[in-house]
Image: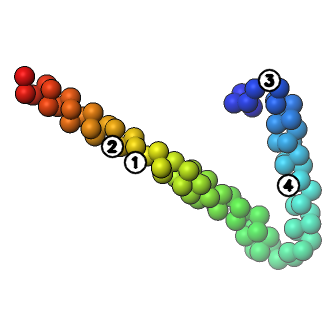
Amino acid sequence: MELVGERYRPALGTAIQVAFSLGYMLQPVLAYKLRDEFWYQVAATSPNLIFPFVVMYVSVSFLKPFLSYFLVAHVACFFCCHMICCYK
């Protein structure tokens, strides 16, 4: 919550609590629909297994245009500094 301004903190705190409340309310529905304990565990843990990969994919696809500029700038800076230092 420290990443947002003071104006948005109450709304963000409420949104976080609403997400947790919805998760708690969906657990009995999920348990009622999936009577077998194995499939209940699979359904309950699959979002935790998929979510990190989704976050990595979105972050890499968002940062990919910036990574090439960053690498080109640093390689060019390295070669320029190397040429200046070595060929005095």
Residue at x-position 62% and y-position 58%: 54
Image quadrant containing the C terminus: top left
Q: Which mark is residue 68?
A: 1
Q: Secondary structure at mark 4?
A: helix
Q: Secondary structure at mark 3?
A: loop
Q: CA distance from mark 2 to mark 1?
A: 6 Å
Q: Is the Cβ of the residue at disc 3 closer than 8 Å to that at disc 2?
A: no
| Number of residues whose C-alpha sits closer than 10 Å to that of mark 3, classed few (under 14), some (14–19) or many (20 or more) | few
Across and down, in percent, residue 68 comes to: 40, 48
| Number of residues whose C-alpha sits closer than 10 Å to that of mark 4, classed few (under 14), some (14–19) or many (20 or more) | few
Q: Secondary structure at mark 2?
A: helix
Q: CA distance from mark 4 to mark 2?
A: 45 Å
Q: Is residue 18 rendered to the left or right of residue 69?
A: right
| Number of residues whose C-alpha sits closer than 10 Å to that of mark 2, classed few (under 14), some (14–19) or many (20 or more) | few
Question: In the figure, residue 30 lies in which quadrant?
Answer: bottom right
- The amino acid sitting under disc 4 is Gly
Counting residues from the N terminus, which is met first, the one under dot 4 or under dot 2? Answer: 4
Q: Which residue is mark 4?
A: 23
- The amino acid sitting under disc 3 is Glu
Q: Which mark is residue 6?
A: 3
Counting residues from the N terminus, which is met first, the one under dot 3 or under dot 2? Answer: 3
Q: Which residue is mark 2?
A: 72
Question: In the figure, residue 38 lies in which quadrant?
Answer: bottom right
Q: Is the Cβ of the residue at disc 1 closer than 8 Å to that at disc 3?
A: no
Residue 40 vertical placement versus 25 (above, below): below
Front in this rendered view, residue 16 or 84 = 84
Q: CA distance from mark 1 to mark 4?
A: 40 Å
Across and down, in percent, residue 74 comes to: 32, 37
Counting residues from the N terminus, which is met first, the one under dot 4 or under dot 3? Answer: 3
Q: Is the Cβ of the residue at disc 2 closer than 8 Å to that at disc 1?
A: yes
